[in-house]
């Protein structure tokens, strides 16, 4: 069977090949936020349970948990700029050779 011009153009002019468009992608941040809002077994949110666990870990001496709490509650500290240090470099004096002229 030979292809004719009609077979080579499956859509009419101005007609989209995908009329419903691309399916919207799931936004990971939105999915995580919705999951964290869901109630946990003790009727508090999962997010609250996670924060309580993080605080508990920090109170038991977990330094990383404490860093996270302070970073999100008060912001990360800005690194201090090092003081400029001036140093003097002393180079050896050049050696002079006597040339035979």
Image (cartoon, rainbow, N blue to C red):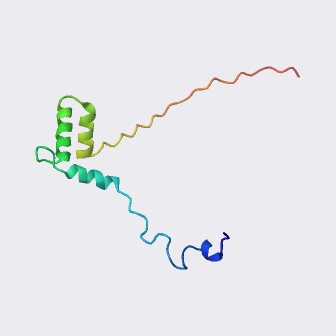
Above or below for 93 versus 28: above
The quarter in which the N terminus is drawn is: bottom right
The quarter in which the C terminus is drawn is: top right
Residue placed most toward the observer, 61 or 35 = 35
Residue at image point 50% right, 71% down: 17
Residue at image point 13% right, 44% down: 41
Residue at image point 36% right, 39% down: 80
Across and down, in percent, residue 10 comes to: 56, 73
Above or below for 71 versus 37: above
Q: Is residue 44 left or right of residue 95?
A: left
Of all residues, the one furthest to the bottom in this rendering is: 13
Of all residues, the one furthest to the front in this rendering is: 1
Q: Is residue 62 left or right of residue 19?
A: left
Residue placed most toward the observer, 62 or 24 = 24
Above or below for 3 versus 32: below
Across and down, in percent, residue 33 comes to: 26, 52
Quadrant in which residue 79 is drawn = top left
Across and down, in percent, residue 62 comes to: 24, 30
Residue at image point 65% right, 74% down: 4
Across and down, in percent, residue 18 comes to: 47, 69
Residue placed most toward the observer, 99 or 45 = 45
């Amino acid at each position: 069977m030979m292809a004719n011009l009609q077979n080579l153009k499956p859509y009419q002019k101005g007609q989209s090949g995908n009329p419903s468009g691309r399916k919207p992608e799931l936004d990971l941040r939105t999915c995580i936020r919705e999951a964290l809002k869901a109630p946990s077994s003790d009727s508090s949110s999962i997010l609250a349970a996670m924060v309580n666990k993080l605080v508990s870990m920090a109170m038991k001496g977990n330094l990383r948990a404490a860093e996270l709490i302070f970073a999100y509650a008060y912001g990360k500290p800005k690194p201090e700029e090092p003081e400029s240090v001036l140093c003097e470099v002393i180079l050896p004096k050049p050696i002079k050779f006597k040339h035979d002229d």
